[in-house]
C-alpha cells in the first residue's frame, strides 16, 4: 500500500519551505494518519482591524469532491468562520478560492507552494472585507473579475480568483498580543 502524499517529505518539504521562511513560528502543522493541517496565526490582511488565523487542511481522501483534481491540489482553507461572503462553500464555510474546473494555470496547485496559497487567501480575505464594507449581499463590490457561481447541484461556488493573482500583502503575521 503506497504512503499517502502528506506523509512524504519529498512532497511536504518543498510545499512548506518558503512559507516557513516567511512566517516562521506563526506557521504550525499537525500531522494525522490521513490529514495534514497547517495553522497560521496572525495573518495581516489589509483593511482587517485584527490579524486573521488561517487553517489549511490536506486530506489523504478528502471528505468533499475535488472535481477531478488531485487531493493535494484541493485543500480545505478556513479563516474568519461565519463571516459573510459570496465566495465560500455553503456546506463547511471553507473559502472558495478558485473554480475547480479551471485549467491548472488559473488555480492553485501544490507545486506552487504553501506561501502562494497563503497569499491567495490573504487577497481573498481582503476582497471579502471590501465586499462587506461596500454593502455585502446588498450590492457589495468585489474588486476584481467576479465569475458566476456554482456547478449545478454541487454547492460549489465560482470564485473571484480567475485572474493573475494580485497580492494584498501586508508585512506578514502580527506578533501575538
Image (cartoon, rainbow, N blue to C red):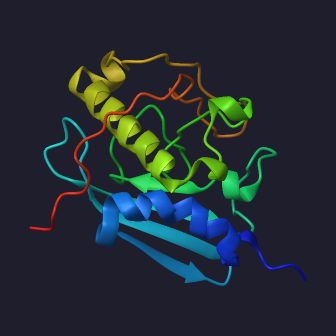
Residue 123 or residue 63, whichever sits in front: 123
Residue 133 position by quadrant: top left
Q: Is residue 33 visible?
A: yes
Q: Is residue 99 left or right of residue 118?
A: right
Residue under the image location 73 percent in, 70 percent down = 5
Residue 6 position by quadrant: bottom right
Residue 87 or residue 9, whichever sits in front: 9
Residue 71 position by quadrant: bottom right
Identity of the residue furthest to the right in this view: 1
Residue under the image location 75 percent in, 67 percent down = 61
Vertically, is 145 above or below 113?
above
Residue under the image location 35 percent in, 57 percent down = 22
Q: Is residue 51 left or right of residue 106?
A: left
Residue under the image location 60 percent in, 47 percent down = 112
Residue 118 drawn at (x, y percent): 43, 49
Q: Is residue 67 left or right of residue 84?
A: right
Residue 72 drawn at (x, y percent): 69, 58
Which corner quadrant holds the N terminus? bottom right
Q: Is residue 6 visible?
A: no
Vertically, is 134 above or below 58?
above
Residue 11 drawn at (x, y percent): 68, 66
Q: Is residue 17 left or right of residue 107?
A: left
Which corner quadrant holds the C terminus? bottom left
Number of marks drawn: 0
Residue 137 drawn at (x, y percent): 35, 24
Vertically, is 170 above or below 150?
below
Vertically, is 154 above or below 5?
above
Amino acid at each position: 500500500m503506497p504512503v499517502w502524499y502528506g506523509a512524504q517529505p519529498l512532497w511536504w518539504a518543498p510545499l512548506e519551505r518558503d512559507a516557513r521562511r516567511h512566517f516562521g513560528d506563526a506557521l504550525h502543522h499537525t500531522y494525522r494518519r490521513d490529514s495534514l493541517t497547517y495553522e497560521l496565526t496572525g495573518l495581516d490582511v489589509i483593511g482587517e482591524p485584527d490579524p486573521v488565523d488561517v487553517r489549511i487542511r490536506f486530506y489523504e481522501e478528502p471528505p468533499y469532491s475535488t472535481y477531478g483534481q488531485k487531493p493535494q491540489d484541493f485543500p480545505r482553507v478556513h479563516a474568519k468562520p461565519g463571516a459573510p461572503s459570496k465566495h465560500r462553500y455553503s456546506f463547511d464555510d471553507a473559502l472558495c478560492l478558485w473554480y475547480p474546473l479551471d485549467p491548472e494555470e488559473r488555480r492553485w496547485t501544490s507545486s506552487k507552494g504553501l506561501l502562494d496559497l497563503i497569499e491567495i487567501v490573504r487577497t481573498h480575505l481582503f476582497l471579502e472585507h471590501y465586499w462587506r464594507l461596500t454593502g455585502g449581499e446588498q450590492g457589495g463590490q468585489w474588486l476584481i473579475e467576479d465569475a458566476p457561481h456554482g456547478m449545478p447541484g454541487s454547492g460549489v461556488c465560482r470564485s473571484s480568483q480567475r485572474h493573475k493573482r494580485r497580492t494584498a500583502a501586508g508585512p506578514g503575521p502580527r506578533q501575538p498580543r
